[in-house]
Amino acid sequence: MAGDCCGDVKFDGVSAAYKRALWAVIAINGTMFFVEMSAGLAAQSMALKADALDFLGDTVTYFISFLVIGQPLLMRARVAFLKGLSLGVFALVILGATFYRVFVSGAPDGMVMGQIGALAFAANVLSVLILLKFRNGDSNVRSVWLCSRNDAIGNLAVICAAFGVAWTGAAWPDLLVAMVLAGLFLTSAFKIIRQSLGEMLEEKDRLALPGEAAVQASPKS
Protein backbone atom coordinates (compact mmCIF):
# COMPACT_ATOMS: atom_id res chain seq x y z
CA MET A 1 0.00 0.00 0.00
CA ALA A 2 1.52 3.30 -1.00
CA GLY A 3 1.78 6.25 1.30
CA ASP A 4 0.03 8.63 -1.07
CA CYS A 5 -3.18 10.35 -0.02
CA CYS A 6 -6.40 9.26 -1.63
CA GLY A 7 -8.95 12.02 -1.44
CA ASP A 8 -9.34 13.12 2.18
CA VAL A 9 -8.14 9.77 3.54
CA LYS A 10 -4.56 9.91 4.81
CA PHE A 11 -2.30 6.88 4.95
CA ASP A 12 -2.18 5.72 8.59
CA GLY A 13 0.77 3.30 8.39
CA VAL A 14 -1.32 0.11 8.46
CA SER A 15 0.81 -1.72 5.93
CA ALA A 16 3.27 -4.61 6.25
CA ALA A 17 5.62 -2.85 3.83
CA TYR A 18 5.57 0.34 5.90
CA LYS A 19 6.23 -1.57 9.13
CA ARG A 20 9.25 -3.30 7.55
CA ALA A 21 10.52 0.06 6.30
CA LEU A 22 10.09 1.56 9.75
CA TRP A 23 12.04 -1.25 11.44
CA ALA A 24 14.89 -0.83 8.94
CA VAL A 25 15.05 2.91 9.62
CA ILE A 26 14.94 2.33 13.40
CA ALA A 27 17.97 0.03 13.13
CA ILE A 28 19.88 2.52 10.96
CA ASN A 29 19.21 5.44 13.32
CA GLY A 30 20.03 3.50 16.48
CA THR A 31 23.37 2.38 15.08
CA MET A 32 24.29 5.85 13.85
CA PHE A 33 23.54 7.44 17.24
CA PHE A 34 26.32 5.43 18.88
CA VAL A 35 28.72 5.95 15.98
CA GLU A 36 28.18 9.69 15.69
CA MET A 37 28.04 10.49 19.41
CA SER A 38 31.33 8.64 19.96
CA ALA A 39 32.91 10.57 17.10
CA GLY A 40 31.43 13.86 18.31
CA LEU A 41 32.92 13.38 21.76
CA ALA A 42 36.30 12.41 20.31
CA ALA A 43 36.38 15.31 17.83
CA GLN A 44 34.77 17.84 20.24
CA SER A 45 32.25 18.71 17.51
CA MET A 46 28.95 20.29 18.50
CA ALA A 47 27.55 19.65 15.01
CA LEU A 48 28.25 15.91 15.30
CA LYS A 49 26.80 15.79 18.81
CA ALA A 50 23.70 17.66 17.65
CA ASP A 51 23.21 15.25 14.78
CA ALA A 52 23.80 12.26 17.08
CA LEU A 53 21.08 13.51 19.44
CA ASP A 54 18.77 13.73 16.45
CA PHE A 55 19.55 10.10 15.60
CA LEU A 56 18.65 9.13 19.17
CA GLY A 57 15.43 11.12 19.08
CA ASP A 58 14.48 9.59 15.76
CA THR A 59 15.15 6.06 17.03
CA VAL A 60 12.83 6.56 20.00
CA THR A 61 10.08 8.39 18.11
CA TYR A 62 10.12 5.94 15.18
CA PHE A 63 9.63 3.08 17.65
CA ILE A 64 6.71 4.96 19.22
CA SER A 65 5.33 5.55 15.72
CA PHE A 66 5.46 1.80 15.14
CA LEU A 67 3.62 1.05 18.39
CA VAL A 68 0.65 3.31 17.57
CA ILE A 69 0.10 2.11 14.00
CA GLY A 70 -3.51 1.01 13.68
CA GLN A 71 -4.60 2.90 16.80
CA PRO A 72 -7.41 5.51 16.64
CA LEU A 73 -6.53 8.79 14.93
CA LEU A 74 -6.79 10.71 18.19
CA MET A 75 -4.11 8.57 19.81
CA ARG A 76 -1.83 8.77 16.76
CA ALA A 77 -2.23 12.55 16.65
CA ARG A 78 -1.43 12.86 20.35
CA VAL A 79 1.73 10.80 19.90
CA ALA A 80 2.75 12.94 16.92
CA PHE A 81 2.13 16.06 19.03
CA LEU A 82 4.47 14.72 21.72
CA LYS A 83 7.06 13.92 19.04
CA GLY A 84 6.83 17.48 17.79
CA LEU A 85 7.36 18.80 21.30
CA SER A 86 10.36 16.50 21.85
CA LEU A 87 11.89 17.66 18.58
CA GLY A 88 11.51 21.26 19.73
CA VAL A 89 13.17 20.39 23.06
CA PHE A 90 16.10 18.80 21.20
CA ALA A 91 16.48 21.99 19.19
CA LEU A 92 16.60 24.11 22.36
CA VAL A 93 19.16 21.75 23.94
CA ILE A 94 21.34 22.04 20.83
CA LEU A 95 21.08 25.84 20.91
CA GLY A 96 22.02 25.93 24.59
CA ALA A 97 24.98 23.62 24.12
CA THR A 98 26.13 25.63 21.10
CA PHE A 99 26.12 28.93 23.01
CA TYR A 100 28.04 27.23 25.82
CA ARG A 101 30.58 25.91 23.31
CA VAL A 102 31.27 29.46 22.09
CA PHE A 103 33.08 30.12 25.36
CA VAL A 104 35.22 26.97 25.13
CA SER A 105 38.49 27.41 23.28
CA GLY A 106 39.67 25.12 20.53
CA ALA A 107 38.30 24.02 17.19
CA PRO A 108 36.86 20.54 16.55
CA ASP A 109 38.62 17.93 14.43
CA GLY A 110 37.53 18.71 10.87
CA MET A 111 38.79 15.40 9.46
CA VAL A 112 36.70 13.30 11.85
CA MET A 113 33.69 15.57 11.29
CA GLY A 114 33.93 15.09 7.52
CA GLN A 115 34.33 11.32 7.67
CA ILE A 116 31.50 10.70 10.15
CA GLY A 117 29.31 13.30 8.46
CA ALA A 118 29.69 11.46 5.15
CA LEU A 119 28.83 8.13 6.81
CA ALA A 120 25.78 9.63 8.50
CA PHE A 121 24.68 11.22 5.22
CA ALA A 122 24.83 7.83 3.48
CA ALA A 123 22.78 6.25 6.29
CA ASN A 124 20.14 8.96 6.11
CA VAL A 125 19.90 8.91 2.32
CA LEU A 126 19.22 5.17 2.63
CA SER A 127 16.50 5.91 5.21
CA VAL A 128 14.96 8.57 2.96
CA LEU A 129 14.87 6.17 0.01
CA ILE A 130 13.25 3.48 2.16
CA LEU A 131 10.55 5.91 3.33
CA LEU A 132 10.11 7.83 0.08
CA LYS A 133 6.80 6.28 -0.97
CA PHE A 134 5.42 6.73 2.56
CA ARG A 135 6.17 10.47 2.80
CA ASN A 136 2.48 11.47 2.78
CA GLY A 137 0.01 10.47 5.45
CA ASP A 138 -1.29 11.36 8.89
CA SER A 139 0.84 13.32 11.35
CA ASN A 140 2.35 10.12 12.76
CA VAL A 141 3.54 8.93 9.33
CA ARG A 142 4.56 12.37 8.13
CA SER A 143 6.64 13.06 11.25
CA VAL A 144 8.81 10.05 10.39
CA TRP A 145 9.39 11.36 6.87
CA LEU A 146 10.19 14.90 8.05
CA CYS A 147 12.71 13.66 10.60
CA SER A 148 14.47 11.47 8.03
CA ARG A 149 14.58 14.28 5.49
CA ASN A 150 15.95 16.65 8.12
CA ASP A 151 18.70 14.18 8.96
CA ALA A 152 19.91 14.01 5.37
CA ILE A 153 19.92 17.81 5.10
CA GLY A 154 21.67 18.07 8.46
CA ASN A 155 24.41 15.70 7.43
CA LEU A 156 25.17 17.78 4.36
CA ALA A 157 25.46 20.76 6.68
CA VAL A 158 27.86 18.84 8.96
CA ILE A 159 30.05 17.99 5.97
CA CYS A 160 30.11 21.67 5.01
CA ALA A 161 31.04 22.56 8.58
CA ALA A 162 33.89 20.04 8.45
CA PHE A 163 35.32 21.74 5.38
CA GLY A 164 34.91 25.11 7.08
CA VAL A 165 36.71 23.97 10.23
CA ALA A 166 39.53 22.37 8.22
CA TRP A 167 39.90 25.52 6.07
CA THR A 168 39.78 28.13 8.83
CA GLY A 169 41.07 26.17 11.82
CA ALA A 170 38.30 27.85 13.83
CA ALA A 171 35.21 26.56 15.64
CA TRP A 172 32.65 28.98 14.19
CA PRO A 173 31.67 26.85 11.13
CA ASP A 174 30.81 23.99 13.50
CA LEU A 175 28.82 26.28 15.79
CA LEU A 176 27.02 27.90 12.86
CA VAL A 177 25.89 24.53 11.48
CA ALA A 178 24.71 23.39 14.93
CA MET A 179 22.52 26.51 15.10
CA VAL A 180 21.17 25.89 11.58
CA LEU A 181 20.29 22.31 12.57
CA ALA A 182 18.48 23.60 15.64
CA GLY A 183 16.47 25.97 13.45
CA LEU A 184 15.59 23.13 11.08
CA PHE A 185 14.41 20.97 13.97
CA LEU A 186 12.26 23.80 15.34
CA THR A 187 10.64 24.31 11.94
CA SER A 188 9.78 20.61 11.60
CA ALA A 189 8.54 20.51 15.19
CA PHE A 190 6.13 23.34 14.35
CA LYS A 191 4.84 21.50 11.26
CA ILE A 192 4.29 18.25 13.18
CA ILE A 193 2.58 20.01 16.09
CA ARG A 194 0.32 22.02 13.76
CA GLN A 195 -0.79 18.94 11.79
CA SER A 196 -1.32 16.83 14.90
CA LEU A 197 -3.39 19.56 16.58
CA GLY A 198 -5.52 19.81 13.45
CA GLU A 199 -6.09 16.06 13.46
CA MET A 200 -6.97 16.04 17.16
CA LEU A 201 -9.55 18.79 16.68
CA GLU A 202 -10.95 17.07 13.58
CA GLU A 203 -11.29 13.75 15.39
CA LYS A 204 -12.86 15.32 18.48
CA ASP A 205 -15.40 17.10 16.27
CA ARG A 206 -16.17 13.85 14.47
CA LEU A 207 -16.68 11.96 17.73
CA ALA A 208 -18.92 14.72 19.04
CA LEU A 209 -21.25 14.70 16.01
CA PRO A 210 -23.35 11.60 16.94
CA GLY A 211 -24.16 13.07 20.35
CA GLU A 212 -25.06 16.45 18.90
CA ALA A 213 -27.24 14.80 16.26
CA ALA A 214 -29.06 12.84 18.93
CA VAL A 215 -29.75 16.00 20.93
CA GLN A 216 -31.08 17.80 17.83
CA ALA A 217 -33.25 14.82 16.88
CA SER A 218 -34.77 14.41 20.35
CA PRO A 219 -38.38 15.74 20.71
CA LYS A 220 -38.78 18.98 22.59
CA SER A 221 -40.59 18.75 25.89
Image (cartoon, helix red, strand yellow):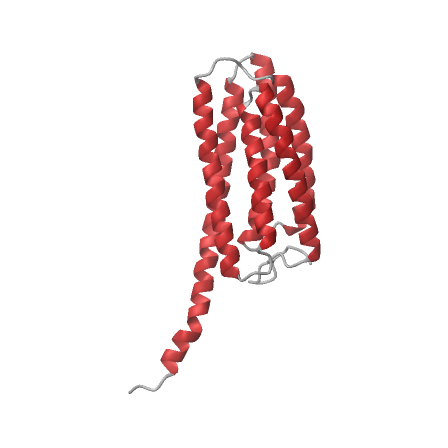
> Which residue: 67% across, 39% down?
28
Residue drawn at x 53%, y 62% as measured from the top left:
72
Which residue is more in the foreground, 144 or 180? 144
Q: Position of residue 4 (x, y in %)?
A: 63, 56
Res 159 seen here: no
Q: Which quarter shows the C terminus?
A: bottom left
Q: Percent position (x, y) of residue 54?
A: 56, 36
Q: Is residue 170 above or below residue 73?
A: above
Q: Is residue 23 left or right of residue 90?
A: right
- Residue at point 53%, 22% (across, down): 174
Q: Is residue 215 above or below residue 38?
A: below
The residue positioned 43% from the left and 17% from the top of the image is: 103
- Total labels drawn: 0
Query: Could you say which quadrant of the image residue 99 lies in?
Result: top left
Residue 73: x %, y % from top left:
52, 60
Residue 140 screen position, x and y as percent: 55, 52
